[in-house]
Structures are given as structure tokens and as C-alpha cells.
Amino acid sequence: MTLSTSLRPRRGRHSGAARTDRLIQWGTWLLVVVLIFGPIVPVVYAGFVDRPLYESGGVLTLDNFGALGEDPAFWSALRNTALFALMAAVPGVLIGAGLAVLVARTDLPMQRFFGVVLVAPLLFPGLGVTLGWVTMYSPSGFVSTWVAEHFGSTPWNLYSLPGMAIVTLEKSVPLVYLMVRARLSSLDTSIESAALTAGARPLRVLWTITLPMLRPALLTAAILIVMIAFETLGLPLILGGPVDIDTLSTYLYRTWTTDPARQGTVSAAASGLLLLVTILLWLRTRVEGDASRYATAAGKATATRRLHLGPLRWPLAILISSYVVVAIVLPVVGLVMTSVTYIFTPAVSPWDVLTSRHFETVFTNDSLFRSITNSLLIGVVGSVLATTGLATAALVAHRSRFRLRSTLTPILFYPRALPGIVVGVGIFWSFVLLTPLEPLRTTVWGIMLAFIVRNTAIGYAAIQSSLLAISTELDAAARTSGATWFKTCRTIVVPLLRPALAGSLILMFVSILNDYDPAVFLVTTGNEVLGVTMLKQWAAGFAGPVAALGIIQIAITAFAVTIGRLAWGVKLHA
Amino acid sequence: MPEINVSALGLDYAAKTAIDDISFTAREGEFLTLLGPSGCGKTTTLMSIAGLVQPTRGSITCGADVLFDSQRSIDRPPERRNCGVVFQSYAIWPHMSVADNVAYPLRLRKVGKAEIAKRVQEALAMVELAALAERYPHQLSGGQQQRVALARAITYGPGVLLLDEPLSNLDAKLREQARIWLKEFQTSVGLTTIFVTHDQDEALALSDRVIVMNDGHIEQVGTPEEIYQRPASPFVASFLGSANLLAGTVLGTAGGLTQVRLQDSGQTVSVGADSLAGDVLVMIRPEDVELFSDTNAADHATLQGTLASRTFVGSSYRYIIDCGGQKLSVASRERWEPGPVRLRFAPERARLFPHASATAVPTLTEELSHA
Ligand SMILES: Nc1ncnc2c1ncn2[C@@H]1O[C@H](COP(=O)(O)OP(=O)(O)O)[C@@H](O)[C@H]1O
Ligand SMILES: [Mg+2]
């Protein structure tokens, strides 16, 4: 038994390859930095110069901020946004956390059903859902009309700040629910058992033991909702628009589109919004860090001991079911019914006014139909590009010795703090100012870029969590065998990462398909995308075709998610 | 086979110095072991040689090749160091068959198809896995995975074989077999091998030479016999096997014997001649101490004590003897009852260490009484 002669790795080829590795690493880093910070630069810069960006000879000044401070509309928008955020965050956290505790820790009936149904809205297109709420609960909506007929009046008004906050629950409750559940699963049930054996009654245990342990998760969830309230555009535009309630984002949108002379002021406001949301993101990351530090040691997986709700079991189940019907099922029903009827009201039986006209309109009207094909196109191309880029970035961040590797993860998570409207305006200005990029401005590719930038964190998180679970010794073994960094990534790490890449692909596709706020400034004839078309058609009063588009959007999303699940076993909320 | 030379190698992490300017040489064809408790820097040292972590200072050479030199800013990437590495987790790529795993380094080297087949066959035969070439990693036992990792690490004829606790993931029975097998394997391929372990038995059984590490530095380098019989520090003495360390003061040296008065009890013991003076520690292994009955051995067993406890450990009994305040562990095949006893050990079996070096060494009796 002897060893064959030694095969040395070839020198020249390898030092060349090492250079390729460095090139890829620098290239990836630069691309990430330019894409994510590039769009912010013109927005912030415009806030500090005395004339519009397209005019030369701008002088640095703080006047824009002064002008902003003197604009009462800005202050009222700021106050409205703060109120809206508060009204959205408090009930959102309470309901989401309550549901999570009940589903995860008690003997509530129908737990598995609730577990699935409660998070389903995360996959619904935000705009479609908002329109669904309007069809049901706005003053002329189906449910409101019915209630008014039977009781004389409706005790709610959707076109108001509380109304906007209620609609926000659709998305915020499932988010809180998931965050709290994740935290609960890291807590050993024995802490509850200990309190029970000490003689505490179940509800008291939930209140005095479980809830305090959840405090960090509740805080991060609250911050998240506040961030959403500050940056969301479509919701306040639809619900606040008709009654002239401005939030920061609609204030920005309106001034930008209607008053070009005040660009400096608006940019100053946008910078302020950016700073605020960035601070919120920083706060949230800090709280999350603290939370993970004092998580109870993840011990051996023991069977979860469930608290007994006793006589409250069924009343609670019925209460939650009513929530599901009112907040999740009915808006979707409203959207469906609006898309297939001439008029959707309790006064007429829907069966008498059924029509396929709205769908026909969608498929025959060039502009409407193009918004579907465009959205599909940028969804497919964008998700492939984004996943490729994000995977490379994750490999540089976690699997290389690249000097600036540790900056990549925070940078890629930063877009969570980028209000869509700011990204949109930033990209618009970048295209206007950088002549070689100008042709991109009126294409779908500019919109695709904006959507990708806005959603990097989603795809990156999916890839990163799987990458961190792959032992670094697997790539170390390839390196010592003679493979360069890039070769190792391609032949060892990427094949092992395949399920996560599929997950990122699906998530990015769905996000790009359903996103719209960054595109409101970029859309012109020819590059329409679903969300913006819906927003504009809605404003023009065409509810039927908009509902049809919403249904199509939901159908495509469901199709993509199903494909992902069947073909790659992708699970969407980790 | 080249020799590996590590010189003044140091590596600082933000909070901690993982290796503290260590130097050693692995000679041609030698089986050299890095032995030390968990966290002492063994893996870091090994991975510095492989090029997977970047040391802060020092240099590493393999024959005439400089692999790393901080002063000359040389840091050859791992793929160009030609080391064969077996990782603690084995790191068999789960998406490739056994044969593909072993062939991977050869494909990187653009070896012809026929040559690859031949070498894979050869390597798998060497590790006695020829029949399992088409299997996938999850269909293999731990012992088989370990051998695939070895085959993969040697197919391309590396300059040096680096093994990071390759036996620690095997269960006790298999580990014993694998140990014998590994030794034969290394002798037959004749590769310079650096082996990392925290298991003293493994180190003693396998190595030509052992480097005992502690907290980032080298405590002692020597053959297994040397480090066991003539430990250079109390740490080495207690880390390799069991050792009693008794505090005392040197009285003087005469006739080839040094007399030491033990603390607390004031009794005097004789050890082999030593140049130390002042406060010392007397090291004696439990199996080197003989017990006698208190009544009839006063002439040749001068040390007196009280048998405080007895533990049956299978092959023998372990006793804790209280020598006027200092506790002493003794191994004996005979069964003794609690009460006064006498003890004796051969002077050449005992060693002296300066007392200052005793810091942070867990005493044996403490360990025993916790067990
Ligand atoms: N990436 C790292 N960052 C910080 N400290 C580290 C890192 N890797 C290892 N260490 C520290 O360096 C010391 C030596 O580690 P290691 O070489 O793995 O020890 P061993 O293999 O002997 O158990 C340990 O204290 C460990 O905590
Ligand atoms: Mg180790």
C-alpha cells in the first residue's frame, strides 16, 4: 500500500483564479452599495440645495428645512402619521400577541386551522386587500350598507385615521403573530409549568409569566408596525385621499406630483422621513439583539405543555373565528364579488348582476393587460437577478475573507428602512441626472430595479439563514482540496443552498409582483405595473377592473407559492 | 515528504489571544500530535497551517515553500498549500457520492478520467471502502465517513496530513479500532501528519512526538514516554494521566536524593536529586504510590496518612488519603479499609516543580471528590 505521486496544484492558474475571486468580491460589494445607497443620494442632496437638481449651479443651503418647518400641511401630516402609527401599533401588537399565545400555548380548538389562516394575509397583495376592505366596510360598502339598513347607522368610518389603522391590522397582526410565535418557541414551557405547580391559574400564568417574557418581541413588533405606518403609501392614499387626511408619505407624494416648485422642501421632508425610519430600524435591531441575549437556553425539545382554557375554550375559538371572517375572509370576498358584479350591494342580489365584463376589460384594454405582463416579466427576471446577486453577496459576507465582508449584511438589511416612495423618487432622479441611464427611466427595468432594492432584505434573509446552517467545514474541505473560493462556492455551497435559493426566488417574485409604491413616479405609458395601474384606475373610479386585477394578482401569487411548495418544498415564513 | 516548520506563530482575536507565539517542527514522515484541553488553540494552529485562518504574526513553511510569513506579507491561499485535511465533522459533501468526494480534488487538478478512476480506486482501497464507492454520505456510518474524509485528503498526494480530532465523533468502541487502524495507515503512507486531540490516550498511543498545549502556548514537546514520565510542568503532569501535587519545602540534597518537608503534616519525603530550592510541588502518580498497613511498615514506608475514602473503578480501587491536610490519590488493586495507613513511593518516580507554577492546575483529589 503506497501513495501515488503527488499532484501539486498548478501555480499560474491558481494565482489568476485568486484574482478572479477578489474581483467578484469587490464587484459584488460595489454593486450592493451603489444599488442601495445610490437612490438615496439625490433625494438627500436635493434637500440641501437651493434649486431643483436638473438646474446647474446649486448652492448648499438649509432653507428647505426652514420652509418645511413653516408648512402647516407638513406638521399636520406628521401628526396624522404619528397618530396613525400609534392606533395601528397598539391593537396590532395586542391582537397578534394574544392570538400567538392562544394558538401556541393553550388548548384552543382548531389550532392548526388558525395557524395557517392567520398568516395567510402576508401573501395577499397589500393594495388588493385594502380595496377589499373598501368594498366591504367603506360608507358605501356592502357590510356598512347592510348594517346601516338594519341599525340605522354604521358605527365606524373607514375613511379616517382609525379606519386606516384597522385596515393595517390585516398585515400587522400576522407579522406580530409570527414574531411572537418564534419567541414563544424559544421559551421552554417548563417556566409556565413551574408557575402552575406553584398554584397559579392558567390565565394568571399567561398574564404574569408568559407575557413578560415576550416583552422584547412585542417591542420589536410595535416598532415594525410604526415603521410600516410611516412608509406605507397606498393605504393612506386610498382611505385618506377622499377626506383630505395626509400622512407623511401622501404629503410627499402629493407635493412631488403637484407642486414641482417645492421639490427642495419635499426632499428635505423625505430625508427626515428616511432618518426617522432608519432610527426605528436601528432601535428594532438593538431590541432584537438584546432579546436573543436573554432567551432561555434552547433545551431539549420537550412536548409543549398546553394551558387549559377551561370554559373559555369555545367562546375564544368563536371570537377568533369571527376575527378571521371579518378581517380576512370578507375583504377577499368583497374583492371577488366586486370583480364579478356590476354593482356589489346588499340591495341587489349578486346573482342578478353577475358579469365577466371587468375581466374582459382587463384582457382587452392594452394598458391594463400590459400591467399584468409587465409585472410578470419583471417578477421573473427580477427574482432571478436578485437571487443570483443576493446569493453571491451572502457568500461574500459569510464565506470569504473579503475585507469589507462584515458590512454587507447590514447594508442588505437596510432597505427595510427605505420608504418605497423615497426609493422611487431617488431612482427617478438618478435616471434623470445620469445621462447614460436616462433611457432606463421609462422602461420596466427601472421599476424592476426599484422593487429589487426595496425587497432585498426578504430574499437575503431567506438565503442567509440557510447559509449559516451549512457547516463552514464543508467549504474549508474544498479549499484545502485545491478549489478557489469561487469554485468552492459554485461546486459545494450553492448546490447545498438550492432550497433556500428557490425560496428566495419565490419570495422575490411575489414581492416584486405585489410592490408598487416605488413605481408611482416611474410609471408612464408602456411600463405600467399591476399595483400602480390599480391605484390609478381606482382613483379614476373604475372599481370593477381594479378588483379583477387584484384577483389576478392574488391568483398569480398563489400559483407561485404553490409551485414553490410542490417543486422545492419551499416554506414561506421561517 | 517535506517537514513543516512553525515559527513564532501568534493569532489574536478581539477578546483573546488564541495562539501565543508558538514554534515547532513536524519532521518528515512524523506523526506529531497537538494535545491540550478544549479551547487551548489546537484547531487554530492546525487551520493556520492549512490556510483557513489568518495568523497575526509568525511564519509557516513546508519544506522550501513559505506558506505564511507575516513580515513578508506572504499568505498563500488554502487551495495552494497542498495540505490534506480531515475535519472534526469530516465535512463529506452530502450532495456527492463517495467516489465523487474523493475525485473532487483530482478533478480540480485536471487529471485525466482514467487516472482519476485509478486513484480513487486506490485511495478507497487503502481505507477499505472500495465497495462503497457509489454510496452517498448519509448512507455511511461515522467510522466510514471518517475514512472517506481520509481518502479524500490523500488522493492527490498532499505534502502534509492535518487531522482535527478525527476520532472524537466515533463511539468509544469504534474509536479504539479506528485508532489502531489510523496508526497503521499513517505508517504505511508515510505522510508527515499533524494530529489534534484533547484525548491523552489517543495522543500517547498514536504519536511519534506530542506537543502539549495550554491556553495558546506550548507546555512541553517530547515523545509519549517523555511527557508522561518526565512532565515539564504541573499542567502536563495532571493533563496526562493523574498526578498528585503535594506542596512542600526543599530541605536539602544529599546522596542523590532531595529531601522535601510536606506542608501541613511536616513529614519528609525523598525524591530524585533536583536543583530546585524553596517552595516546591512534589508530583507523584497514584499508581506509583504503595499502601501499607499502619502497624508493621514503619521502617520502609515513612509517610503516614488516613485513608479517607475508597472508590471501586473496575481494574483497581482509588483511595483518597489524607496526609495531615493534603489529600493524595492512590490506585491499588488491594482492598483497604478506612483508617490510618502508611505510604511509600520510589524517589525516582516523583518530580519536583517550583510552587509558583502551580496556579490554575486542578488538583486531582478535587476532581475525584467531585466525580
Ligand atoms: N472566530 C473566532 N473568534 C474569536 N475567538 C475564537 C474564534 N475561533 C476560536 N476562538 C477562540 O480561540 C481559542 C482557541 O480555539 P480553538 O483553536 O478552536 O481551540 P481547540 O481546538 O484547542 O479546542 C478559544 O478560546 C476560542 O474561543
Ligand atoms: Mg478544536
Image (cartoon, coloured by chain):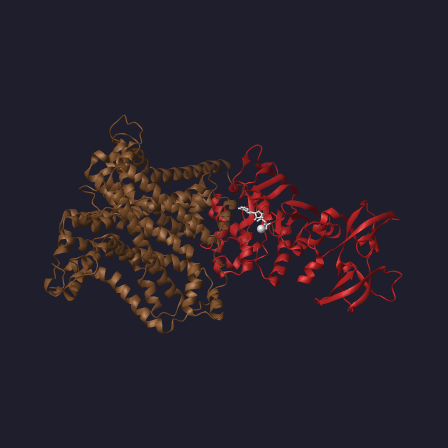
Chain colours: A brown, B red
Q: Residue A325 sits in which quadrant?
A: bottom left
Q: Quadrant of the C terminus of chain B?
A: bottom right
Count up the numbered dots: 0
Q: Quadrant of residue A439?
A: top left
In the rendered image, the residue lying farthest to the bottom is A311
Look at the picture and state if B144 lies above or below A527. Answer: below
Classify residue B230 as left or right of residue A101: right
Q: Quadrant of the N terminus of chain B?
A: top right
Horizontal arrangement in the rendering, residue B257 relative to residue B80 (left or right): right
Q: Is residue A238 left or right of residue A488?
A: left
Horizontal side of residue B190 vs A197, given as left or right = right
Q: Residue at x 51, y 46 (%)?
A: A481
Give me the residue at 75% from left, 50% from top. Answer: B230
Q: Position of residue B285 (x, y in %)?
A: 75, 57
Out of A340 and B358, give the one closest to the viewer.
B358
A83 vs A565: above or below: above
How far across and down, in percent of the image, does residue B261 sit? 83, 52
Q: Point out residue A364 in the picture as x, y percentages from the top left corner.
A: 13, 51
Q: Is residue B285 visible?
A: yes
As drawn, which residue projects farthest toward the top? A57
